[in-house]
Amino acid sequence: MNEVLENIKNRRSVRKYKAEQVPQELLDEIIKAGLYAASGRGQQNTIMIQVTDKKLRDEIAEKNCEIGGWDKGFDPFYGAPAMIIVLAKQDWGNRVYDGSLVMGNLMLAAHALGLGSCWIHRAKEEFETDWGKSLLKKLGVEGQYEGIGHCAIGYVEGEYPPEPARKAGRVFYVK
């Protein structure tokens, strides 16, 4: 089978990571895959923020945990040492769709490079806060952006998740 189709079929969300940092060369390849995601009218109205700085990573995890309502100390990123946050221009009608395509490319690229990944929600809520807006400002991001998702990335700790059974009755044909 085609390598791309195999990666699509075999990728799983990973929820347990080794602490080992992902080399920048691999993160650059994953980011590049995100930059090549399809976008409405070819506008490319998404941005990505790579986070490997442990202090900021842990601060984001804490904010995400607060928003999710979990107990202090829970790690909603499952120990992943790297994340790529996807945001899209707030006034762009296709922002969620375009950002979702970026997220899909990031996860597929991570899998193709032997890494685990997981889409972590609550980026929208994070970047609606003063904290999130301040972070964007510190990074030099101009304009209004909506958080789409966090792509947690790292080396898989333990066994790779098994393939769940596919639900029947999800495809309808009109010939």
Image (cartoon, rainbow, N blue to C red):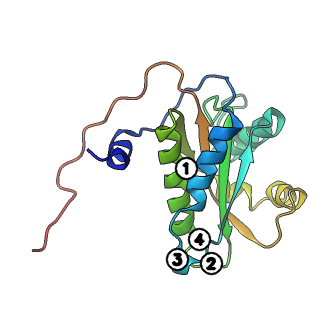
Residue 58 % position (x, y): 77, 35
Marks 2, 1: nearer the viewer: 1
Q: Amino acid at mark 2?
A: Trp
- Horizontal side, residue 20 vs residue 6: left or right: right
Residue ID for mark 3: 40
Q: Amino acid at mark 3?
A: Gly
Picture quarter containing residue 77? top right
Gap between marks 1 and 3, in whole Å? 18 Å
Label 1 neighbourhood size at 10 Å, few (<14), some (14-19), many (20+)?
A: many
Picture quarter containing residue 127? bottom right
Seen from the viewer's position, the closer of residues 124 and 25 is: 25
Helix or strand or loop: what does disc 3 sit on?
helix
Residue ID for mark 1: 106
Residue ID for mark 4: 95
- Horizontal side, residue 43 vs residue 14: left or right: right
146 is higher (above) or lower (below) than 114: below
